[in-house]
Each structure stands twice: as structure tokens, then as C-alpha cells.
Amino acid sequence: MLPVQLCVAALLVVCITHWIYRWRNPKCNGILPPGSMGLPLVGESLQLLVPSNSFDLPPFLKTRLHRYGPIFRTSVAGRAVVVSADPEFNHFIFQQQGRLVESWYLDLFAKLFKQAENRADGAYVHKYVRNLILSHFGVESLKETLLSPLEATVRETISTWSNQESVEVKDAVSAMAFDFATREIYSSDAENFSQNLREKFTCLSRGLLSFPLNIPGTTYNKCLKNRKAALDLLSMLVKKRRASPDQMHKKVDVLDHVLQDMTSEKFLTEDFIVQLMFGLSFVSFETVSGAATMLINLLGNNPLVLEELTAEHEGILKKRENPNSSITWEEYKSMTFTLHVINETLRLGSVSPGLLRRARKDIEFNGYTIPKGWAIMLLSSAVQMNPEIYKDPLSFNPWRWKDLEPSVISKNYMPFGSGIKQCAGSEYTKLFLATFIHVLVTKHRWIKIRGGNVTRNPMLQLKNGLCIKILGKND
Ligand code: HEM
């Protein structure tokens, strides 16, 4: 070999060795939490994707929490991440939103959600969006306008299910939740392409946690295409509504609301509104349908819980003058055991293992430093499985909620997050699930046809879904 080639080869070896060393020992102005960065580029992504068949934490997290303690470092999908199952640290990070940390989203949603945060008026925009959603899906709206149509939709939909040979629960509840929520978001405009839009969103949700490799054929690539198609449809819808502002809707929906605010709120551009419609449509059905499916599955496997739940709802009917009248807000508020069942379902069956943030500055905690730019995963699922708080944490036991103090719950139960970014749809979700249960146990019963086995990879799902046959109450 010529001396020049030798020199180039030697330089290459030095550079690669240095790069590998840097990968394994990332720069930090202090001590990094314990852990390993795995293989160059891939990190520990492959280990994270090893599936497990239980409600328990994914094996990837369990082994590392056992080995390193409640805070450790790793690298997933090409990104440096600190993972925390420490309730004190998680609480601290939730309080630091917008100061030491910002939200961090998967690339698929980054543009959508980061639009607001990257602006100088980010806090103002966040507050506007939050208030907008709360004014349509918050307690007042639920009580005054949504409860009755929600119950009517659930009754009608479950009744059509009872005419079918079988129902794939996740798909069927997704369709119902999507159609109901999008009626509140963009009314009847959506009806023309509701199914088309719903299909795009459903495909998108299937690849949420896919590896961000954008080449034809990958799940990520398909997700990006579906996202674009959904955004194009929504863009058409917004343009159409803007072009005919005189066509007033009987009830102001979310789209009317933002279009009316365009003159006073300069940040409300057409692109922003399309992104907002996209994000809201997605969160309003995907999460609820996952929770409802898990709920039916858990009830099917726990007959004593179903018995007590049915008794609570039949008790409500007995107190009514007309058993067929609609649920009142007071009746909803009296569903104590139902709320315990919902809490327990979300504790055990939360789809995502945790919430993501990114360090805006170096963060010091308990002698460790989390470098600026690193992602932080707050493991709400690990906190919700803590055996010191939730005895026998893998068992589905709604009765445990009778004895849990609110102060303990606030730090150890966070399916809806915490702090200023706490879920704006939590009350809607609880009402949706309670109404769903009410109709299901007072008017129907069901038998499982197939499916229902849980799997984590690392999102919690039902392997092969859950397929049921809906029957009348006395069939
Ligand atoms: C089972 C149902 C649901 C679960 C488990 C859930 C969970 C969450 C969580 C954990 C967060 C906080 C994210 C973070 O801190 O990074 C969040 C935020 C949010 N959720 Fe939900 N969610 C559910 C249903 C819904 C629904 C039905 C809607 C809309 C109607 C909704 C709208 C939102 C919004 C707008 C935010 C952002 C709030 C903010 O930044 O101020 N969610 N959700």
C-alpha cells in the first residue's frame, strides 16, 4: 500500500474509533446518569422493541431499572435519552415545562406541536389552544351540550353493533369516537370525507412509534404519506369553510371558533389551523378507543367487577321515573365505582410507557447532569406499577381506589400527564367511557369471540385485537 493510502486508512480508523468513543461517552458538564448508549447509531432501539405479553413494564425498562436504579441513560432511535421512574424527578420535570424542559414529540408530530413552542409568544399560543379545547371538551361543555348527544350516539352505535355477527372493538370504537369528536371540531363538513379521513388517521396511529427511517416500504414512510393525505384533506376543508363564511352553523364548532378569532389572533394562520385540526382529530379518538377496548377486555376477564359495575348502573335506572330517559349530570357524578374502574383501567392499561420531554438547558438532579438537548422519558407506567402504592400492581382491582388518598394519587397516577400540559381531554374521556359503560351494561351484554391477549412493544396493545358479539340484555 502506498504511504498516502496508509495515512488515509489510519486517519479513518482514528476518526471511527474516536466517533465510537464519543458515542459511548457523550459529552456532559457533570456526571451522566448510569446506563449504556448501545451500538453506534442504533443505540438500544432493538432491545426496546423486544415484545412482552403482560401489563408489566417492557423487559427493556425492567432490566435497566433493576440494574441502574430509577434514572438511567440510553439511546433510542438515534437519540440520547434519560429515562426516569423516579416520582420526585418526574414531578420536578413536569413543573419545569417551558423553563428547563420543553415537550418532545416523535418526528411525525414534531411540526404540528412544535409550531407553538418555538415562538416567542409560545406560552400565549399554548394557553389559547388549551382554552379553545377546554371550551369545547371541558366540564361546562360536557354538562351543557355534549352529554345528551354523546349518550344518543353511543346507544345508536352499540345497537347497530348488536345486528352484526361480530365487532372488532378498537376499530368500531375508533369510528364512533372519531365521528362524534369531529362533529364537535368541524361539524357536518366532515361527513363527506369522514371515513376517508378516519382511515388515514387509523393508519397513522399504527406506526406511531416506528423507527424514523424514511425509505419506501417502511412503516415510518407509510405514516408520513398518511399524515400528508390527512393534512391535505383538512386543508381542503378549512379552505372551503373560509370561502363561505356566511354559512353559519347552528352551533359554533372548533373550526368556526378559530376562523372567527383569525382577525384578532395573528398567530392563527391557515396552516396553523390545519395543523391544529389534525392534532385535535388525532388525540380525540385514538386515545379514547384504546382505553375503551382495554376496558371491555378487562371487564370480560373480571366478572366480579362487571357484576358490581352493572349493579351501580341498574341502581341508577331504578331511581329514574322513566328508565329510558337520558343520563343526567347528577347521575354521572354518582357513578363512584365506574370512576374507580376507569382509573384502574388507565393505571394498568395506559398505552404509552411514558411522556417525552427535551432538556432546554443542562439539568442537575441528585448529583447527575442531563445535558441540554437530551430527551427525557418520564415513565408514568412504572410509577403506576409501584407495589408500595398499588399492592399486587398487575391485578385489576378497582376497589383499591376507595382507600387511596388524593395526595398519593396526585404523585403516583398520571395517565393524563401533570403540570401545565395536563390532558385537556381528561374529563371528556372519563365521560365518554362512563357513558359507554352505562349503555353497554344496562342495554346489552357481550361475549368474546377472539383476541384480548396483551402485548407490549413497547406500546401496550391487544395482540390480534379484541373481537366480540354484542347481544341484547336478555338474549
Ligand atoms: C384515554 C384517553 C387519553 C389519555 C390517556 C390522554 C393522555 C394525555 C397525556 C398524558 C397528555 C400530556 C402529554 C404531555 O405532557 O406531553 C395529554 C395532553 C393532551 N391531551 Fe390527552 N389523553 C386522552 C384523551 C384526550 C382527548 C379525548 C382529547 C381531546 C378531546 C385530548 C386532548 C389533549 C390535549 C389538547 C393535550 C395537550 C394539553 C396541553 O398541552 O395543554 N386528550 N393527554
Image (cartoon, rainbow, N blue to C red):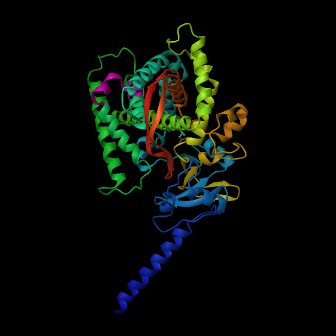
The magenta stretch is: 179-193
**Residue 148 seen from this side:** yes
Would you identify the image quadrant in which residue 66 lies?
bottom right
465 magenta-colored: no
Question: Which residue sits at x=29%, y=29%?
Answer: 237
Question: Which residue sits at x=47%, y=30%?
Answer: 446
Compare residues 210 and 224 and report the one nearer the observer: 210
Compare residues 262 and 97 and report the one nearer the observer: 97
**Residue 254 seen from this side:** no
Give the mark count: 0
Image coords of residue 167 (percent x, y): 40, 34
Report the side of 155 relative to 241 (left or right).
right
Image coords of residue 164 (percent x, y): 36, 29
Quarter occupied by the N terminus? bottom left
Magenta highlight: main SS: helix
Report the side of 335 relative to 267 (left or right).
right
Compare residues 398 and 28 and report the one nearer the observer: 398
Compare residues 287 and 163 and report the one nearer the observer: 163
189 magenta-colored: yes
Would you identify the image quadrant in which residue 29 lies?
bottom right
